Amino acid sequence: MLNVKHRGRVYRLEGKFLGVRVRLSLGTRDGAHAEQVKRRIQSAEREGNTSDLWPELQRLLPGAAFAKLSGIAGYVEKTAAPPPATWQDLFRSFETECLQRIAIGKFRSTTWARYQQTCKPFAQFLGESGVSELPQIAKPLIEKFKVWRMQQILKRKSSRGGRCLALDVAILHRIFAHAIDCELIPKNPVRLEGRPGHNPEAGAQPFSARELEKLREAAGLDRLLFLLLRHTGLRGSDAVSLCWREIDWEGREINRVTQKRLKRVIVPIHSELLFALAAEFQKRRPKGEERILLNPGTGKILTRPRLYHRMLALGQRAGVPSARPHRFRDTFAVDLLAKGASPYDVAKLLGDTIATVETHYAPFVRELRERARRFMESDGGLEMAAGNGTVLAHLTPNAKLTN
């Protein structure tokens, strides 16, 4: 039984609530209002902790009084479920992580730029599909995106058969792995499509001696660029960002940490390249932080895309098709292997792994295959004459070894 009594300036609720004696302030000086509140409390008492009156009582009662009554009744406030996370939520979260890692030197800005090249078409695909929430992005939708993305890639002139699809898929897999870490989704909806960049049918594409001769003759204003790529094996990103302070004139070496793998490479400078660098240095008198390669047409810093187009243009002038910058790296590696350098030596100069050198470059060195041929065709081995004291020549599947 609950009663309303006037005590001091306000009315109080006294009596038993669900068998528990209570004495609580109602926080009002209006007796009629106090009676209305009491009747709602009694109704909530009868209906239990699932009564719809509890949210109203939370607004009417002082905090201490509501906490006491709701605790006795076992009422738990219902919280509205948060809306499902969207692709934009995931992208912003992943972007924040990448920018943080870039700031501490554990992620490359160029890598983040490549990630964005995948995120943009994926967002376009989701918009065309009318999908925004992460729970809607399931495996069937990702498989549809792969087909859609392949069609978009093949429309380009330099599609390369859509080989970059594997990289797009790997990037999405990494982003959704971040979503799992953030507990936005329970499992990754992206199924990988092999290792990005791995193509057993393709490998090193070095220039031939004749092609190098043509390129050197047609280099013109691009001579320094040609010599730097030819005699260092640097990736295009490292070539365009190479600074004068990374030139060791006394040691005749280039000392640099590569952008892609963050490995230090120390490359001896070929005499032809050294002469060209010295001439350029005398001409410009640059500071150590200035970049070596400039755009011959404008004198401004040479960018990676501009480097690519200048090399293609050089190839066209020289009559050498597909003179991509990376082919100079292939040429540098294969040339060293052909001259007798070990895969370890080449890996250290390229800032790569020995496994990559053995897989990507060594199979394309004719001299190595010819050396193996000479070993195979040389006298001796397992088929030595029996007179030389070996029994291996007489072993057959039915032969028996005797003491």
Image (cartoon, helix red, strand yellow):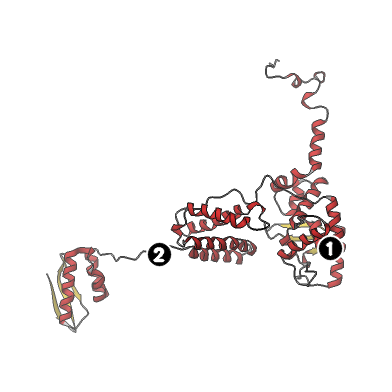
Q: Position of residue 390 (x, y in %)?
A: 77, 21
Q: Position of residue 5 (x, y in %)?
A: 13, 78
Q: Is residue 209 left or right of residue 187?
A: right
Residue type at mark 2 is: Pro
Binning the other alpha carbons within 10 Å of mark 1 as few (below 14), some (14 to 19) or many (20 upward) gives some
Q: Is residue 14 left or right of residue 89?
A: left
Query: What's the CA distance linking mark 1 and mark 2?
Result: 60 Å
Identify the mark nearer the N-term, 1 or 2: 2
Element type where label 1 sits in the image: helix
Q: Position of residue 303 (x, y in %)?
A: 72, 66
Circles 1 and 2: CB atoms closer than 8 Å: no
Mark yes or no: residue 183 visible.
no
Find residue 223 and name its label. 1
Residue type at mark 1 is: Arg
**Disc 2 designates what residue?**
83
Find residue 178 and name its label. none
The residue drawn where x is 78% and y is 44% is 365
Front-most of residues 299 and 356: 299
Give the position of the C terminus as an image quadrant. top right
